[in-house]
Image (tube, rainbow, N blue to C red):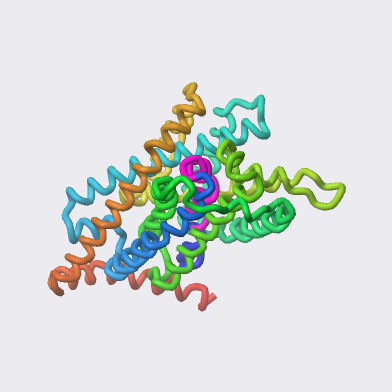
Amino acid sequence: MKSPLPTLLQGAMIMMMAVGMTNHVFIIPALLRTSGRDAWLCIICSAPAMLLLLFTMRFIANKLGDEPLDSWIIRHAGRPVSVAFRLLFTLYAVVNIFSTMYETMLWTRINFLLNTPMGVTSLFLMLVCYRASSKGLRAIANTAGILLPLVCLFGFTIASINIKYKDYNQLFPMLEHGIWPVVNGTVYVMAGSFELLLFLLLQSGLRSKISLKSLLILGFCILGITFGPVIGAIVEFNPYEAVHLRFPAYEEWRLATVGKFLSQTDFLSIFQWLAGSFLRICLLLYVTVEMWQIKTDRKKNTTLLFICVVLVLIGLAPISDVYMHQITVDWLYPSNLALLALAAAGLGVIAAKAGRRGDSRGQSGQQRQRPRQQQRQQQRQQPEQS
């Protein structure tokens, strides 16, 4: 008996962990150095673009139905467009997997494992991610369901403990250097938030379609978890000190003390960081392999293992942190935004054309989907029968 499909809530939890790792940790240094005191305004300014993305995703999801995204693109736009989409997405996923791995291992070496080579820690991380992603979407969803509540609990805990250090007067005055720092910083917020587009790649593996309500709640949560570390860094360290911090979200943990006898609580940040990196890498590995519709489990596992080994080997190269950070800030995040925005626009156009073509191709597509829909209905009924 096959296991039932993950629920929409579990899919949203995966996205919160994966996208939240970007918005809550990775983009914060770039955002603070670009916008300084006005970094929190960038999050507000990104909200209209986020809403536009969410409504576009709902329109695409409605046209997509239960069909895998790649098959849907082939049916409505042709195989060349599908191949181009797969190649660009594979490049995007592999680069971001490496960036996540590198940032995580660098943070680990700087703060905890000073004498442990990054190659050793990255090897263990990628092996765990390979194992989880090879088990499929349900394993990733179950893991997210366990880890996300704990991550949120620790996040609210640190926000509450550090209230005594916060000076909200540091948020003002606004726009002291003009509007352009806010405009430039908004690019980084949107680069992280637009990763919600990956949710469309999971829809065919979920029990129900993505709803507008779920997207709006998810988008609100993503903006909320971006606000936390940005405002926290400004009001706890002041904007002039915050711009010099390499990992502001972690430094906030180092301030926290509980009573007179517990002064080191940053060990909880290890759990938060590794949980987010783990699920982000697992998600990108999973959707990369699924996008190419590899049939057998053996070929899927071989492909996953190949990607992991190659990235670990690349990580052994003597890359300077300053150089890597510069590439990430100047090239990776703007390129991510451009690619994701282009993908959202392209999928929106395909969905609009698919709706205007009438029922001739739509009926053939529905006929091809019927066996899959019947299988999904059987999987939904399995928990009830058990």
Q: Nearer the viewer, residue 47 or 342?
A: 47
Residue at image point 40% right, 43% down: 333
Please tell me whether the stretch drawn in magenta is mainly helix, strand or loop.
helix
At horizontal 48% and vertical 29% (from top left) the residue drawn is 315
Residue segment shown in magenta: 16-35
Q: Examine the image and state in which quarter residue 326 appears.
A: top left
Q: Nearer the viewer, residue 101 or 310?
A: 101
User: Hey, which residue is sitting farthest right in the picture?
Assistant: 260
Which residue is at a point 13% across and 69% down the rendered structure image?
Answer: 357
Is 378 one of the magenta-colored residues? no
Q: Is residue 21 covered in magenta?
A: yes
In this rendered view, identify the residue nearer to me: 245 or 297: 245
On the image, the x and y values in percent for residue 41 come to 48, 55
**Image-based side of 186 in relation to 103, left or right:** left
Residue 238 position within the rendered picture, expressed as x and y whole percent measured from the top left: 62, 45
Q: From the viewer's perspective, is 212 left or right of 161?
A: left
Residue 386: in sight, yes or no?
Answer: yes
Q: Residue at x 51, y 78 (%)?
A: 384
Residue 276 in picture, x, y percent from top left? 55, 49
Say if 312 sits above or below 134 in the image: above
Is residue 285 visible from the viewing direction of this image? Answer: no
Residue farthest along the top direction in this orientation: 318
Quarter of the image for the C terminus: give it: bottom right
